[in-house]
Image: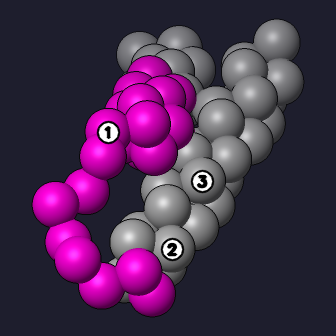
């Protein structure tokens, strides 16, 4: 029970890292939308959420150490 905080931080680390990497992966998958503005918005959102997930993962890694 003394390491419950570390376990919670690790769970957030894994979740944020997984979501961040999957968002970056979705950046490279082509969209089937003909609207160019929608494709640009989708690519921007994927990069933003990917970067946010990786930053949160690194913060949690620092918090555990």
Q: Which residue is drawn at 25% across and 56% down?
A: 31
Query: In the drawing, what numbered circle is on residue 60?
Result: none
Separation of marks 2 and 1 at Cα, in angstroms:
13 Å
Residue 27 is covered by the magenta coloring: yes
- Residue 2 shows in this picture: no
Which quadrant: the N terminus? top left
Element on which disc 2 rests: helix
Q: Name above or below for residue 27 compared with residue 33.
A: above
Residue stretch in magenta: 14-37
Residue at the spot x=45%, y=45% of the render?
27
Which residue is located at x 65 percent, y 36 percent?
A: 54
User: Picture coordinates of residue 26 (x, y %)?
Assistant: 36, 41
In the foreground, 12 or 39: 39
Judge left or right: residue 7 versus residue 52: left
Residue 61 locus on image (x, y percent): 72, 21
| Secondary-structure class at tag 1 | loop
In this rendering, position of residue 6 left or right of residue 25: right
**Which sits earlier in the primary sequence, circle 3 or circle 2?**
2
Where 35 sits versus 52, above or below?
Answer: below
Circle 1 residue:
29
- Disc sitting over residue 40 in the figure: 2
Which numbered marker is on residue 47?
3
């Amino acid at each position: 029970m003394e390491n419950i905080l570390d376990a919670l931080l690790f769970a957030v680390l894994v979740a944020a890292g997984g979501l961040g990497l999957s968002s970056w992966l979705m950046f490279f998958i082509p969209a089937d939308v003909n609207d160019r503005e929608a494709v640009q918005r989708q690519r921007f959102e994927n990069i933003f959420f990917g970067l946010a997930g990786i930053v949160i993962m690194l913060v949690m890694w620092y918090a555990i150490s």
